[in-house]
Image (tube, rainbow, N blue to C red):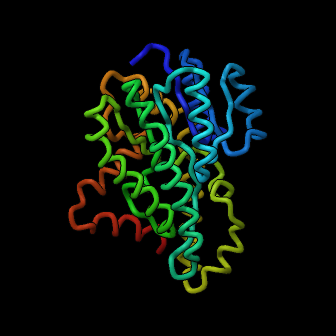
Amino acid sequence: MRSIMIVLITGTSSGIGLSAAVQAAEAGHQVVATMRDTSRADALRAASPDIDVRQLDVTDGDSITAAIDGVIRDYGRLDAVVNNAGAGHIGTVETDSVDNFRKVMETNFFGVVQVTKAAMPHLRAARGRLITVTSVGGVVGQPFNEAYCAAKFAVEGMMESLAPVAAQHGVTVTVVEPGAVASEFVANVGVDVETVFEAAGPYAPQLKAYVGRTSTSFSGAQTPDEAAATIMEALTAEQPPFRVQTSDWARQFNGVKLADLDGSAVQKLTSGWIS
């Protein structure tokens, strides 16, 4: 890889995406930091004024094409893409809507598909890197996360299948799997929790237990900067792994699933969150 890379990152208005953009810029790379609403770029610009902030909505194919074409027009190449944009969601299939499932898939899965599809010709030309932030929820299915985990499982399956094909053309594919990252869990999911409890019907007691447990785990989580450091390692390592976790907790948690041939260990673990 070149010592100075042209790096496009999605979902950079906050959290891991913001931290990854700042760290990549501080390392000397030309960062094109994208977000759906560029009016939310103040924190990013304050942290690193040299970052090139552009609009990109991962659910809008025209927006994706315009952003990537603009990078090629202005910089001549694209060396790396970090698929980071995504959104959380809680609910269970009986009481949730099919439309909500579709919306979650549109952002978290099809958004990744569209950005990757548009970027691949340029990554092939640069023999570049495709890094996708998934989640431990892309490995371990979790209560009240059916839609979210389905999307993240799909991303992991797509990238695991793409990796050997892309490698034949010089493109390295990596998935980065964070666990809990310090944030306000309920706010990040974007729901009014009392409304969700009321809509949960017979599942309300289990949902309350899950939200209580998860909110507590998020309060002691790693920082966005710590998670973004793992992205930087994947961006700059000579031979990055396909799958990498951002913390010891994430490694241990995913390890339960990867060694669980009959699924009983995961069921025992996650059932304890809602009982």
Q: Nearer the viewer, residue 139 or 116?
A: 116
Q: Nearer the viewer, residue 214 or 263?
A: 263
Q: Nearer the viewer, residue 83 or 254?
A: 83
Q: Position of residue 40 (x, y in %)?
A: 75, 40
Left or right, residue 36 beside residue 167: right
Give the position of the N terminus as an image quadrant: top left
Left or right, residue 177 beside residue 34: left
Q: Position of residue 72 (x, y in %)?
A: 55, 27
Left or right, residue 263 beside residue 230: left
Q: Position of residue 201 (x, y in %)?
A: 60, 85
Q: Residue at x 56, y 71 (%)?
A: 91
Residue 264 vs 250, above or below: the answer is: below
Q: Residue at x 30, y 57 (%)?
A: 257
Q: Residue at x 54, y 67 (%)?
A: 102
Q: Position of residue 181 (x, y in %)?
A: 55, 45
Q: Which residue occupies the extreme bottom position in the image? A: 202
Residue 232 vs 91, above or below: the answer is: above
